[in-house]
Amino acid sequence: MTKSKIDKITIHSKCLGKEMNVLVYLPYDYDKKENLTTLYFLHGRSGDENILIEAGINIVADRLIANQEIESMIIVCPNIENSRGLNSSFNCKEVRDPLGRIINIGMYEDYLIREVIPEIDNRYNTNRNRNGRYIGGASAGGYAALHNAFRHYDLFSKVGGHMPAIELKLEDEDKAYFQNQDIWEKYDPITIAQQMKSCDLKVYLDAGDKDEGRFYEGCLILNKILNEKGIDSQNHVFEGCHSLEYIKSNFEKYMFFYGKK
């Protein structure tokens, strides 16, 4: 392989009972490498697996890998629909939230952990150790990346929450996902962090200074808790709003966190 490649694969999910698409970025030197690091990157509320291309992730990765500024890595962008990446219902279906927006409920945490990761490890030359597996995401995908990394510490060694949709309380509009306060707390990154012990997980948090959801507030609280636990967490407030453009403008910074040599 003389240049990078993007595979589009389909996983028949038993957890969700349907076909799910995944985009997989393979670096230009993929054929010459073994045990490559894998970054799982999750999209936001209205996105899908195409965030790999829409956010220019492949372009940034091409440049930094070719210039040997970051390690070669596989980047996996699964479609998790509008699910927040959690197990919200045994039956996968679309429902409307109190604001009338369509959301997806189902066993989405199990889909990612039990189906996507094993499928990628079986298909590609991956490092199957947690030290070679990272997870990150944007907006609702950042929220999903954080709770998955915190709840499955044995699988990931780095996590990035980029303008992560961390709410400070259970909002009425989110009650279609969460049947009660206990389930909300089960997936809330701040609540999980309060119960964590010191560990060697590396965490990167950021949000725009004009973020309409004020998610920089949740990042600040979460970062303080993690640091007090002795966990290596960094928090940044960059210029910008809650948008794809914000993610695109900062993606090089993210890639240095995930892949700096």
Image (cartoon, grey):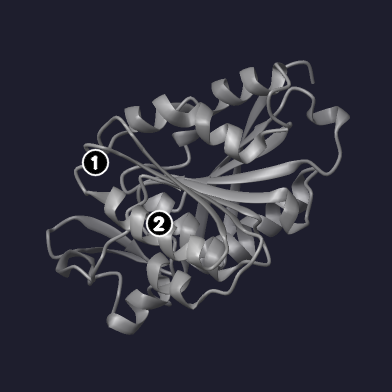
* Residue found at x 60% / y 42%: 76
The image shows residue 124 at horizontal and vertical percentages of 77, 43
Say which of 98 and 170 sits in front. 170
Number of numbered discs on residues: 2
- Give amino acid for label 1: Asp
- Residue 26, by quadrant, is top right
Q: Where is the C terminus found, in terms of image quarters?
A: top right
Amino acid at circle 2: Tyr
Work out whether residue 92 or residue 38 is closer to the camera in this orientation and state it: 38
| Alpha carbons under labels 1 and 2: distance apart | 15 Å
Q: Name the residue under label 1.
A: 211
Whether residue 82 is visible, yes or no, is: no
Q: Nearer the viewer, residue 76 or 95?
A: 76
Residue at 64% in and 58% down: 156
Q: Does residue 221 sit above or below 213 in this rendering?
A: below
User: Label 1's element?
Assistant: loop
- 2, above or below 140, in the image: above
Image coordinates for residue 29, horizontal then vertical, percent: 79, 25
**Left or right: 236 as drawn, with respect to 32:** left
x then y, percent, for residue 203: 54, 52
Q: Do the residues labelled 1 and 2 touch (CB within 8 Å)?
A: no
Q: Quadrant of the N terminus?
A: top right
Is residue 58 placed above or below 174 in the rendered structure? Answer: above
**Secondary element at tag 2:** helix
Look at discs 1 and 2 and give the one toward the viewer. 1
Residue bearing the label numbered 2: 143
